Amino acid sequence: MERKAEIKRKTSETDISLGLNIDGKGIGEISTGIGFFDHMLNLFAKHGLFDLTVKARGDLDVDGHHTVEDVGIVLGQAIKQSLGEKKSIKRYGASYVPMDDALAMVALDLSGRPFLVLDVQFPTEKVGEMETELVEEFFRAVSFNAGINLHIKVFHGTNSHHIIEAVFKAFARALDEAAVIDKRIDGVMSTKGVL
């Protein structure tokens, strides 16, 4: 069974096409018009071993908010669609990732019940052309559209670039772990019988 999804979303603010292969090789082809965001999505693909294509056009003359949030919405929808009924997946994943001065932890549950806890302080308001406050908007959109209980904590860090990079890498690794198929799991990993 191929665990893939293709999603398109067009609004008056953004036009997005996204493809995701959960069982990929870490190949990213990303174009959002926001260089730092492209870099983070490429890191997500590489470190989660996901194949990810994103073509996004947004109202960047306003700011990056709509583009970043809407890519998060579409990525969340693609994660949910590609995992299907979630049969035999491990469900939980966690990862600690250091990046020079920064140390990030991401723990998640593919429960179908979205929740976001983000405990991160950013020393700067922007990295490149991306506002650091958009990191929360992105992960909230992913969490609520994929149905992920997502906890993100940065223990320390003095460089915003390193902090955000550690978070994206940790998210990728945690998602990869949670999405792994374990043949010992009969059906879904829940006593309720459904996720």
Image (cartoon, helix red, strand yellow):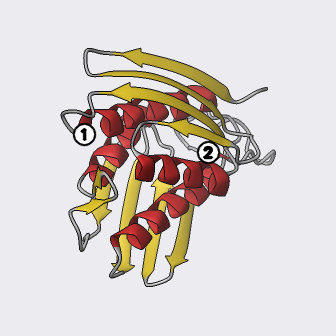
- The image's mark for residue 136 is none
Label 1 neighbourhood size at 10 Å, few (<14), some (14-19), many (20+)? some
Along the line of sight, the residue nearer the viewer: 92 or 61: 61
Tell me the quarter of the picture where residue 56 sits.
Answer: top left
* Residue 91 visible somewhere in the drawing: no
Label 2 neighbourhood size at 10 Å, few (<14), some (14-19), many (20+)? many
Along the line of sight, the residue nearer the viewer: 14 or 104: 14
Element assignment for label 1:
helix
The amino acid at mark 1 is His
- Residue 106, percent from left and from top: 46, 63
Element assignment for label 2:
loop
Tell me the quarter of the picture where residue 3 sits.
Answer: top right
Along the line of sight, the residue nearer the viewer: 84 or 189: 84
Q: Is residue 173 above or below residue 24?
A: below
Q: Residue at x 39, y 71 (%)?
A: 163
| Label 2 to label 1: alpha-carbon separation | 36 Å
Q: Is residue 4 above or below residue 175?
A: above
Instruction: Locate the N terminus by quadrant.
Output: top right
In the drawing, does residue 155 fall left or right of residue 50? left
In the drawing, does residue 45 fall left or right of residue 64? right
* Residue 116 visible somewhere in the drawing: yes
Q: Is residue 44 above or below residue 119?
A: above
Sequence-wise, the earlier of marks 2 and 1 is 1
- Residue 91, percent from left and from top: 58, 48
In the drawing, does residue 70 fall left or right of residue 3? left
Reading the image, the residue beneath label 2 is 189
In the drawing, does residue 18 fall left or right of residue 160? right
- Residue 48, percent from left and from top: 64, 53
Reading the image, the residue beneath label 1 is 65
